[in-house]
Image (spheres, rainbow, N blue to C red):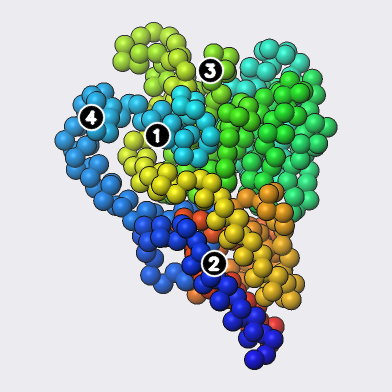
Amino acid sequence: MTAETDTHFWAAERAAALDAADPLAPLRDRFLPAPGVVAYLDGNSLGRPVATTAARLEEFVRDSWGQRLIRGWTEPGPDGPWMNWPERVGDRIAAAALGAAPGQTVLADSTTVLLYKLARAAFDAAATAGSARRVIIAHADDFPTDRYVIEGIAAERGGEVRWIETGLADGVTPAQVADAAGPDTALVLLSHVAYRSGWLADAPAVTAAAHDAGAFVLLDLCHSAGSVELALDDWDVDLAVGCTYKFLNGGPGSPAFGYVRRGLHDVMRQPIQGWMGRLDPFTMGPGYIPAPGIRQVVSGTPPVLAAVPLLAALDLLDEAGISAVRAKSVALTEFVLELVDAWLAPHDVEVISPRDASRRGGHVTIRRAGFRQVVDALWDRGVLPDYREPDAIRIGPAPLSTSFTEVHDGLAVLRDLLDTSRS
Ligand SMILES: *Cc1c(COP(=O)(O)O)cnc(C)c1O
């Protein structure tokens, strides 16, 4: 046996052993199969559907929408009233994934829109209370929509964005936040898991640093919810938003969630005052009076139909438990790193994610010149990671739906492609 075939054999054996020891392995069969897909490595961008999703949608259309009709909005029933879904589904996300007590989370809008609503609410609350507070601190390499939204708020409200710069493989540290924040700071916005590098921020320490400066904290949880353990209440986080179509498997374009710490419900006002966030909306009365509690974050009609697939996925997450999900996620990304080191490093592939598992979220990013074309070849062969500038492939194995053998098989295809391109 050559050294090379020896490595190949070792890796396949190891994947099989990891699968055999995986307590979450049986849950993989609860997802819809995708024939022809060798390895789905993009759970951080779009989670797979739970197999019961189509039946649950059909049942909702047939029995709920179809029979209850307009009564569904307000009359109690097995799934109603629909009017309460923002809070009901919000509480389910909070319990399954956020470490947050009920009454502080809603399902609504898209992440972009909720981010605008909550960031502007925080900016206005800080500017009013502290008068001189007009700076929003954010990561220069944050996800584009986050950057654009706060640039817009700064322009609209006469504020200013102060960017924190980091290396490609890193993320924002509590020390950087402590250095950047001061008496002029209204808000610190941070992605808990950085979309490119996968850096997992020290959320409690960042929150403490922002609070020491008298600023609010807004966490973007798009890449954390359903992947890493969160304790929003214990960490004293002020606000959070996140999407439900990544590790929460809610489906393409499923609604976002927003969290506002209970103590801020009477302090902050979000800017899109719609009828669904008003006290007693059906009185159709004059003037906007915010509904009490978290409900005021809602603006328009709740996205009920679009939330049905998410309910199936949350059942599965409840069954698995987020701590088991995180444990498997760490094991999966460790295995990715082992294979990258053994197979891809000789091809000048560079890892731009943290090596320290406690600082790494649910995906691993690798980089090499010409990866753009390689991704096309991978997709042709049924291996589906995603691509991010510059020259980076993100490998995001969703713990509930991905086996170690799948990771192995996907990376073996990448290895073979690089082997061929060299010879
Ligand atoms: C995926 C993602 C978004 C997506 O926002 P949408 O409004 O759902 O398009 C926003 N921020 C971060 C950090 C993300 O990873």
Mark 1 sits near ligand 1, with its Cβ under 8 Å away:
no
Sequence-earlier tag: 3 or 2: 2
Residue at 40% over, 34% down: 89
Location of mark 4 (residue): 77
Q: Earlier in the sequence, mark 2 or mark 4?
A: 2
* CB contact under 8 Å: marks 1 and 2: no
Q: Which mark is residue 18?
A: 2
**Residue at coordinates 43% horizontally, 31% vertically from top-left?**
91
What is the CA distance from the residue labelled 3 to the residue labelled 1? 19 Å
Element marked by disc 2: helix
Given residues 314 and 285, the one toward you in this image is 314
Location of residue 231 (image quadrant): top right
Residue 12: x percent and y percent?
Answer: 56, 76
Q: Amino acid at mark 4?
A: Gly
- Mark 2 vs 4: CB contact within 8 A: no
Q: Nearer the viewer, mark 1 or mark 2?
A: 2
Of labels 3 and 1, earlier in sequence is 1
Return the residue found at the far top: 286
Per the image, the residue denoted by label 1 is 89
Name the mark nearer the viewer: 3 or 2.
2
Mark closest to the chain's N terminus, 1 or 2: 2
- The residue singled out by tag 3 in the image is 265
